[in-house]
């Protein structure tokens, strides 16, 4: 199987999530299933069915995390000789040329991407447009709503 890139910080976050799922959430849902079983008839026991459904989600996430971490290529951005270019793991400050809106993104692996925390996947159109560019350069991103132009104002390696 192919190795998937992930930042060292992202790998640590996923390991913590995996630990919580295994040591806290899995035992809690097992207890909830046992308690619901004690209430009697399982056919019409909504608590039992909800707990079993939650158990399925937890086990699926545990499996996904274990698989991803076992196939991960952990990259510590602080150890790279990156120069002044946008590379995997760096944080990029941008200005959208048309609206002059400022935005900051960190380019991370697909599994650790979270747009609400401004972490974008290396496979995303904006990350692909930024990779290899330097501070002061413009990047044109082909988006579904049309092309957007961004100016790179700063690059950080943290």
Image (cartoon, grey):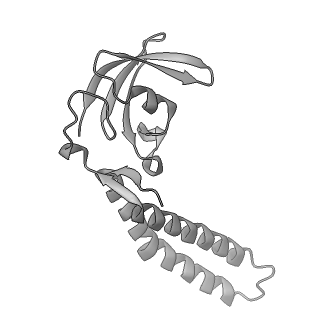
Q: Is 34 on the left-hand or right-hand side of 39?
A: left
Q: Is 87 on the left-hand or right-hand side of 66?
A: left
Q: Is 114 on the left-hand or right-hand side of 40?
A: left
Q: Which of the 4 image quadrants contains residue 34?
A: bottom right
Name above or below for residue 91 compared with residue 71.
above
Question: Where residue 142 sits in the image (x, y, percent)?
Answer: 55, 22
Please give the name of the residue rendered at 22% of the width and 27% of the height, measured from the top-left corner.
84
Count of number-bearing discs: 0
Q: Is 13 on the left-hand or right-hand side of 64?
A: left
Pick the residue in front: 51 or 94: 94
Question: Where residue 94 sits in the image (x, y, percent)?
Answer: 37, 21
Pick the residue in front: 80 or 45: 80
Which residue lies most toward the top here?
98
Pick the residue in front: 114 or 129: 129
Please give the name of the residue rendered at 43% of the width and 39% of the height, measured from the top-left corner.
122
Name above or below for residue 145 compared with residue 20.
above
Question: Where residue 118 sits in the image (x, y, percent)?
Answer: 41, 36
Question: Where residue 54 sits in the image (x, y, percent)?
Answer: 61, 69
Please give the name of the residue rendered at 66% of the width and 70% of the height, measured from the top-left corner.
53
Which residue lies most toward the front here?
1
Please give the name of the residue rendered at 44% of the width and 11% of the height, measured from the top-left corner.
97
Name above or below for residue 80 compared with residue 136.
below
Assign the C terminus to one quadrant of the image.
Answer: top left
Q: Which of the 4 image quadrants contains residue 147?
A: top right
């Amino acid at each position: 199987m192919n190795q998937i890139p992930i930042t060292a910080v992202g790998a640590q976050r996923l390991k913590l999530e995996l630990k919580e799922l295994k040591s806290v959430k899995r035992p809690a849902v097992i207890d909830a299933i046992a308690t619901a079983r004690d209430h009697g008839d399982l056919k019409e026991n909504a608590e039992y069915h909800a707990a079993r459904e939650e158990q399925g989600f937890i086990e699926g996430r545990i499996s996904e995390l274990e698989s991803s971490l076992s196939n991960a290529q952990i990259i510590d951005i602080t150890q790279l000789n990156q120069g002044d270019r946008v590379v995997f793991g760096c944080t990029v400050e941008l200005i959208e040329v048309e609206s002059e809106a400022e935005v900051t993104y960190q380019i991370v692996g697909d599994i650790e991407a979270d747009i609400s925390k401004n972490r974008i996947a290396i496979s995303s159109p904006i990350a692909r447009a930024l990779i290899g560019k330097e501070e002061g350069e413009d990047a044109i991103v082909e988006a579904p709503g049309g092309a957007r132009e961004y100016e790179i104002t700063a690059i950080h390696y943290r």
